[in-house]
Amino acid sequence: MSAAGTVRELRIRPFDRADTEPVVALWRAAGLVVPWNDPYLDIERKLGVQPELFLVGEAHGAVIATAMVGYDGHRGWVNYLAVDGSRRGERLGARLMAEAERLLAERGCPKLNLQVRSTNAGVIEFYRRIGYQVDEVASLGKRLIADAPPIG
Ligand SMILES: CC(C)(COP(=O)(O)OP(=O)(O)OC[C@H]1O[C@@H](n2cnc3c(N)ncnc32)[C@H](O)[C@@H]1OP(=O)(O)O)[C@@H](O)C(=O)NCCC(=O)NCCS
């Protein structure tokens, strides 16, 4: 099947609770689950805030992609962008991001930001290909709720 054909079979829809296990498995396989974030808690939190922007990509009834999108009133954010390892390079990631952009623009969001872990810098080229540029900013964070006991 052509790349264009495989893209067409993707259906993008909001997350449903029944997607929980396949989504967490997809995130684990994609290397997005880290010790300091509990993916189940992350899902629960998102279901309480703009759940309609938590996207899954489905093909033939299977979850093969995700994007957790949010708008804070100033910037849009995307987290947990993932495509099943066997389906990469078919422009599914680009499709998910295009849908995230569409939904954010529809809400009046002027700019989308996202963070890439320094250990995952290889993915920056993917974002460049779909129109993103590296902003000259330092990303700072402060943990407010610990999901897991501190190590050591
Ligand atoms: C990043 C990811 C979502 C990309 O999904 P994908 O469906 O394979 O990407 P696409 O097929 O839509 O690629 C779009 C473009 O980016 C390019 N691209 C994709 N991944 C790339 C990579 N790792 N390095 C360089 N270019 C890449 C593609 O070649 C394509 O280029 P083109 O426009 O010239 O054809 C996927 O690799 C993934 O799930 N990675 C693991 C999880 C992850 O790191 N998520 C991001 C967290 S910040």
Image: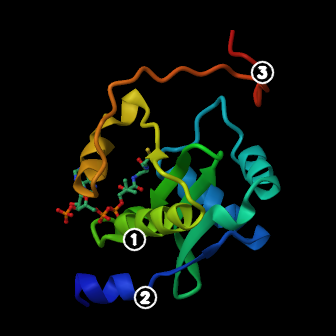
Rendered position, 79 above or below 130: above
Q: Nearer the viewer, mark 3 or mark 2?
A: 2
Query: Mark number for residue 133?
Result: none
Q: Earlier in the sequence, mark 3 or mark 1?
A: 1
Quarter of the image where one finds residue 5: bottom left
Q: Nearer the viewer, mark 2 or mark 1?
A: 1
Q: Earlier in the sequence, mark 2 or mark 1?
A: 2
Rendered position, 75 above or below 1: above
Identify the residue under disc 2. Answer: 9
Q: Please tell me how crowded label 1 is: few (under 14), some (14-19), or many (20+) other residues with Cα within 10 Å.
A: some
Query: Mark number for residue 149?
Result: 3
Identify the residue under disc 1. Answer: 95
Residue type at numbered disc 3: Pro
Q: Please tell me how crowded label 3 is: few (under 14), some (14-19), or many (20+) other residues with Cα within 10 Å.
A: few
Q: Please tell me how crowded label 2 is: few (under 14), some (14-19), or many (20+) other residues with Cα within 10 Å.
A: few
Q: What residue lies at 76% left-to-right and 23% top-to-bottom?
A: 144
Quarter of the image where one finds residue 95: bottom left
Quarter of the image where one finds residue 62: bottom right
Q: How far is disc 2 from disc 1 in space, using C-alphas? A: 12 Å
Mark yes or no: residue 31 visible.
yes
